[in-house]
Image (cartoon, rainbow, N blue to C red):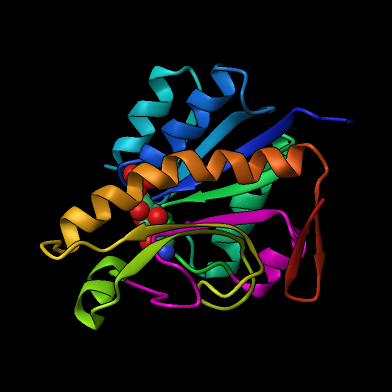
Amino acid sequence: MNTKTLRLGVLVSGRGSNMEAIIKAGEEGKLNAKVVVVISDRSEAPALKKAERKNIKSLYVNPKQFSTKAEYEEELIKIFSSFEVDLIILAGFMRLLSPRFLSYYKNKVLNIHPSLLPSFPGLEPQKQAIDYGVKVSGCTVHFVDEGMDTGPIILQRAVPVLEDDDAESLAERILKEEHDLYWRAIQLIAEGRVTIEGRKVILK
Ligand code: GAR
């Protein structure tokens, strides 16, 4: 199989544990991809320091410095282009990207969401799952389209909801699975095994 080493650009807003898991999978040789640049929309995001410690270029780009969202995203595109990224990885990035950005990077932006989509999109999906009373939740890696957590699904993993779970304990168990799922989805792309037909992802 013709596996290519992908250059990844990561967008983060916070802790960055998914980003770390992807970096680690690359270091361990399980994932044919390398994080080449990390951009945060929050200066205090711990993810920035974590990436720096790995000698990965990490940048804070303040959305408020730009008068429009288009200009902010233009800057993101400029940076990602200069690093020649093949894929953009949203790892806890709490901002919606515009249709313009997404058409520039068509089918090249991935996200992970801590629920079994299409259940519980948006904010606090683990709390939504607990409040609804589902017995199973999980996580989803998907291509990003113009909707909120609506793009074609690449991989999902189920996590049981336990009797005594609260949003925090469920989030913790889902997160463990996220760390093992995200790099696998990226690896499928690196191996050229992913095609999109309509809103379905076909895995070869
Ligand atoms: C993760 O649980 C991720 O799935 C979620 O934010 C957390 C980020 O953690 N993302 C979303 O809810 C996106 N809608 P991390 O910064 O430690 O990777």
Q: Report the residue at 60% width, 55% height from top.
A: 110
Check if residue 101 falls in the magenta segment: yes
Q: Where does the image place residue 141, in percent across and percent down from the top left?
A: 55, 56
Residue 85, quarter of picture: top right
Asked where in the image residue 135 lies, by quadrant, the reply is bottom left
Q: In screen coordinates, is 77 left or right of 39?
A: right
103 in magenta: yes
Q: From this viewpoint, is residue 152 visible? A: yes
Query: Residue 45, relative to residue 73: is it above or below?
Result: above
Q: Which residues are magenta?
A: 98-123
Which residue: 73% across, 33% down?
Answer: 6
Residue at 69% from the left image edge and 33% from the top image edge: 7
Return the residue nearer the eye: 45 or 26. Answer: 26
In the image, farthest residue toward the right: 2
**Looking at the image, is 185 positioned above or below residue 198?**
above
Q: Eyeballing the image, is 31 above or below 174?
A: above
